[in-house]
Image: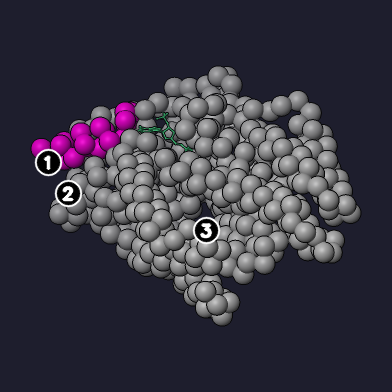
């Protein structure tokens, strides 16, 4: 294959990646965008394998078929709530591949006849691909283990972790300088890779489960940066472009999530939010004797007389798989002339867009999903707000500026301004932030205890009977 053909195919793949990213920016074009990006990846892989004469067409077709079947089965079988850990594990493999490819490239070059010393571009890019790739690999495995419940979701705060991390980082940088100054052996690369693997673990283990989406985006950005570094080392343009796109979009998504939580990236990574749950005394102080509960029949009566209802979904709705029950309730209310809208907080659930995807699965119309800034001014004209499995994103404590409150300053959905608030959850347990929620004890709030899917199904039955 001539160089011109290869470069043209790489350019085509890069254009597909950019169009794919653009498509992913809106739910209506997201599926198309995903397909275009996948075609780009197929072109890039096939051209690379043919160019390097690694395998022939028959192996490529067999690999394509096997990969498609495994991928389709995994995507089909994985529940929505497992999406973050799926992204984490795929991400981790990307980082691991960059580490191995960087080491292997160096070994291969050193094994050949060296006519001149290795250039700085090659050694610096190899070292950065190895370090960043290793951190992305082991960090992503820890993120996967936390979200899959294989290890505790709570932050594990190792003593002296900041000093330990700083020492490992300095050691990696020292080994990189050694490689650049004396590029005659691959030992420094494997050593820095080994240290960076430990660094990935110690960096991610002190971070709480609900902060994992931010960390996964950051690790995703790292794996992109590692791939771009590898692209520089191997002189491969498509790897540089794809890696840079992944790196940049990961960093941007990270920044957007931090902004939505009103927290800095440093706070997410180093503060160990969620490590300390509120004490019983603090919880008792907020709730004692003030929380009122209601039955599904009582809430059905309330909704029957309402003109406008807003549903606020949260993580608990995803856990309960209650999206279809919510859609049934919406249809029933609308058939009775009630206006129904959904209030979507940007960090509700456990990953960006979690609630949008969850509700889209049950065919809830996208037009009904209103973002925080749009829905907040309407709560005063709302008869009933149904908070389903959400907690932190509706916690009025976030309006305080007290730095001891982990969600202080986070913009919230102002549901407490509605005439009546009904909160569906199983108990008074806190959300991820580990703090009590004064909304549950407010004058206009009723608690409807139980699993979200079961409670909403009961509510639908009660409404049909009323
Ligand atoms: P949340 O504050 O974590 O609260 C979820 C609530 O759901 C819990 O209080 C739990 O109470 C309830 N629940 C669990 N299983 C349930 C079930 N089967 N049926 C009914 N209720 C159930 O969730 P959120 O309000 O969605 O807030 C998300 C949190 O994650 C925020 O703190 C946010 O900062 C953080 N976060 C999100 C992202 C993101 O990208 N989305 C990223 C980083 C951090 P019970 O146990 O009493 O039922």
Q: Quadrant of residue 138?
A: top right
Within 8 Å of ligand 1, the CB of disc 2?
no
Q: Quadrant of residue 136?
A: top right
- Residue 158 vertical placement versus 456 (above, below): above
Q: Secondary structure at mark 2?
A: helix
Which residue is label 2 attached to? 332
**Mark number for residue 199?**
none
- Magenta segment: 448-466
Spatial CA distance of label 1 from label 3 is: 64 Å
Q: Secondary structure at mark 3?
A: loop
Is residue 359 among the parts visible in the rendering?
no
**Sequence-first disc among 1 and 3:** 3
**Sequence-first disc among 2 and 1:** 2
**What crowding class fits label 2: few (fewer than 14 Cα within 10 Å), some (14-19), or many (20 or more)?**
some
**Sequence-first disc among 2 and 3:** 3
Residue furthest to the bottom in view is 4
Which residue is label 3 attached to? 54
**Mark number for residue 464?**
1
Nearest to the eye among marks 1 and 3: give it. Answer: 3
């Amino acid at each position: 294959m001539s160089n011109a053909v290869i470069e043209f195919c790489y350019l085509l793949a890069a254009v597909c990646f950019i169009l794919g990213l653009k498509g992913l920016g809106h739910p209506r074009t997201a599926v198309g965008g995903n397909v275009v990006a996948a075609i780009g990846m197929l072109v890039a892989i096939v051209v690379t394998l043919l160019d390097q004469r690694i395998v022939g067409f028959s192996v490529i077709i067999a690999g394509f078929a096997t990969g498609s079947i495994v991928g389709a089965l995994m995507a089909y079988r994985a529940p929505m709530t497992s999406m973050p850990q799926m992204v984490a594990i795929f991400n981790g493999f990307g980082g691991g591949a960059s580490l191995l490819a960087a080491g292997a490239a160096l070994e291969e070059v050193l094994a050949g006849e060296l006519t001149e010393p290795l250039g700085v571009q090659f050694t610096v890019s190899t070292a950065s691909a190895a370090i960043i790739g290793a951190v992305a690999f082991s960090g992503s495995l820890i993120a996967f283990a936390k979200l899959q419940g294989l290890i505790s979701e709570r932050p594990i705060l190792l003593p002296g972790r900041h000093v330990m991390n700083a020492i490992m980082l300095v050691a990696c940088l020292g080994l990189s300088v050694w490689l650049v100054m004396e590029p005659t052996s691959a030992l420094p690369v494997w050593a820095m890779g080994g240290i960076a693997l430990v660094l990935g673990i110690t960096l991610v283990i002190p971070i709480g489960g609900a902060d994992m989406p931010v960390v996964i985006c950051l690790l995703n950005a790292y794996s992109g940066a590692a791939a771009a570094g590898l692209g520089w080392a191997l002189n491969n343009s498509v790897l540089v472009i794809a890696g840079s796109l992944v790196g940049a979009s990961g960093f941007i998504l990270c920044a957007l999530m931090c902004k939505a939580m009103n927290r800095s990236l440093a706070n997410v990574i180093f503060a160990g939010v969620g490590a300390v749950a509120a004490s019983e005394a603090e919880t008792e102080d907020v709730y004692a004797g003030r929380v009122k509960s209601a039955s599904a029949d009582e809430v059905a009566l309330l909704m029957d007389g309402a003109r406008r209802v807003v549903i606020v979904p949260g993580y608990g709705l995803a856990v309960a798989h209650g999206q279809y029950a919510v859609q049934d309730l919406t249809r029933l209310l609308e058939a009775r002339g009630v206006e129904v809208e959904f209030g979507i907080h940007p960090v509700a659930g456990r990953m960006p867009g979690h609630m949008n995807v969850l509700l889209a699965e049950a065919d809830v119309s996208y037009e009904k999903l209103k973002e925080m800034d749009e829905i907040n001014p309407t709560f005063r004209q709302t008869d009933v707000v149904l908070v389903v499995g959400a907690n932190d994103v509706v916690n009025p404590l976030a309006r305080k500026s007290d730095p001891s409150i982990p969600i202080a300053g986070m913009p919230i959905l102002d549901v407490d301004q509605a005439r009546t608030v009904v909160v569906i959850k199983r108990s008074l347990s806190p959300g991820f932030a580990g703090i009590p929620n004064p909304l549950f004890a407010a004058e206009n709030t009723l608690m409807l205890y139980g699993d979200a899917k079961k409670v909403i199904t009961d509510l639908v039955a009660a409404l049909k009977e009323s």
